[in-house]
Amino acid sequence: MSNRTSSIVATRGTLRLNGDRGHGRQESEILQATEARRLLAGIRELAPIIKRRAAEIETERRVPQDLLEALKSLGVFRIFIPYSRGGLELDLPRGLEIIEALATIDGSVGWTAMIGSGSHLFAPLLPHETYDQVYRAEADVMLAGSIQPVGTAEETEGGWRVSGRWPFASGCVHADWMAGFCVMRRGGETLPDPVNPKAPLIRAAFMPARDWEIEDTWHAAGLKGTASHHIVLRDKLVPSTHFLELAHGRPCVSGPLYQSVEPLLPIVHGSFSVGVAQGALDDIVEMAATGRQQFRAAVPMRESEIFQAELGRIAADLKAAKAFLQAEAARLWRRALMGTLKDESLLVEAALAGTWIATTCVHIADACFTLGGGSAVYDSSPLQRRLRDLHVAAQHATVHRRNYTPAGKLLLSPPGPHLDRGREQ
């Protein structure tokens, strides 16, 4: 066992012990800071290796198993798992730093880390017995799935018969458990949502990966190395204990992060976007630092006032995106500590923030690509990969521009006790 692995194992033991006995706020803060520094240091060590293998990751359309194991050993996929299950249970702002750091290195690796760690925010909505089953073997369990409710679950003796074909199941080839959201049916009739009877009842079937089929469909413009294939269940009997409900479910474990998943998702996505945008800015600065002079340019890139002005504007946009991300993450974490995350207006505001951040980061990547000139169009250029990754990521429903509509509607609604019209809450 290497010194690094020994250190990780020792850290896990310390955290598990503290999770079992409980610890004070100051001790928790020290542990959180220590873990975050260790993770970031490990990521910095992995950065050159990941960068050298960027082409391989895209060609293979997945993160290589040895890199995945290295990320596991660091604890990347445990950042949002509770202490009580051997996780690190980082606070939201620190957890987002880890995702951002990996996305800065490589978009596909950052996305895989985001999905692989963020999926553990859904699992506490399972019944306690199933949750215990998921984490019984080890904390480094890998989860994947799709939030699109394109499956059906028909009630039957012993549970529900589930059929469906779900897209965009990022990381499914690495998963131990997978989930697909379904419309719940009884006697051939769609069951109504208990709060909004006009809407169908939606729950996610959560089953071991061995029960699912993976259809090799991920041939995409960007995020090529994320293995975001379709996953399939065909008339599978799923026990009632293997469903979770996102909208109205109650967490089976305690902890600030686990009371409501939905407001957290846009900001988790935002950390990915900011990371890739930072990588694009780093790439164009590195190109200019070589003294490169582009065709028909009067001076080298770094001496051009036009280049300097555009680079300054890009840097300002990135600072704004980072500031918005940090402010929203801090606000959500405060609400989590207060136990008030489950709030419809908070979800709308979080989606607004995540959408603006994703859109701004797309513009940053576009601008960096343009500054890179003809050399940026080659597959060997990281700038074209950053551009493709951010454009594909911004198509995700969590941060798509249509999320601006409910934010505008909220602003036009009558003032209420929870309405935030740009003011701090």
Image (spheres, grey):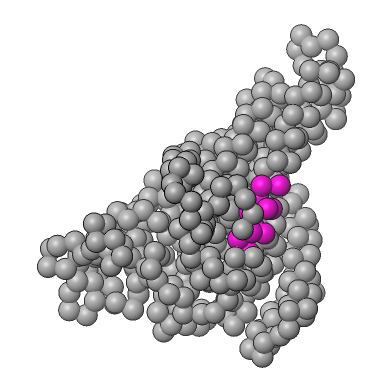
Residue shown at the point (77%, 80%) measured from the top left: 27
- In-front residue for pair 171/121: 121
Regarding residue 216, the answer to whether it shows in the image is: no
Residue shown at the point (65%, 50%) measured from the top left: 325
Is 267 left or right of 275, judged from the image as shown? Answer: left
Compared to residue 26, the image places residue 105 above or below, namely above
Q: Quadrant of residue 4?
A: bottom right
Where in the figure is residue 301, as x and y percent of width and height?
82, 21
Compared to residue 307, the image places residue 380 above or below, namely below
Quadrant of the image for the C terminus?
bottom right
The segment highlighted magenta reads 323-333
Asked if residue 263 is among those painted magenta in the image, a careful observer would answer no
* Furthest-left residue in this view: 187
Is 226 left or right of 202, judged from the image as shown? Answer: right
Regarding residue 32, the answer to whether it shows in the image is: yes
- In-front residue for pair 358/293: 358
Residue shown at the point (69%, 29%) measured from the top left: 368
Main secondary structure type of the part rendered in magenta: helix
Where in the figure is residue 74, as x and y percent of width and height?
69, 67
Asked if residue 328 is among those painted magenta in the image, a careful observer would answer yes
Where in the figure is residue 32, as x and y percent of width and height?
73, 71
Quadrant of the image for the N terminus?
bottom right
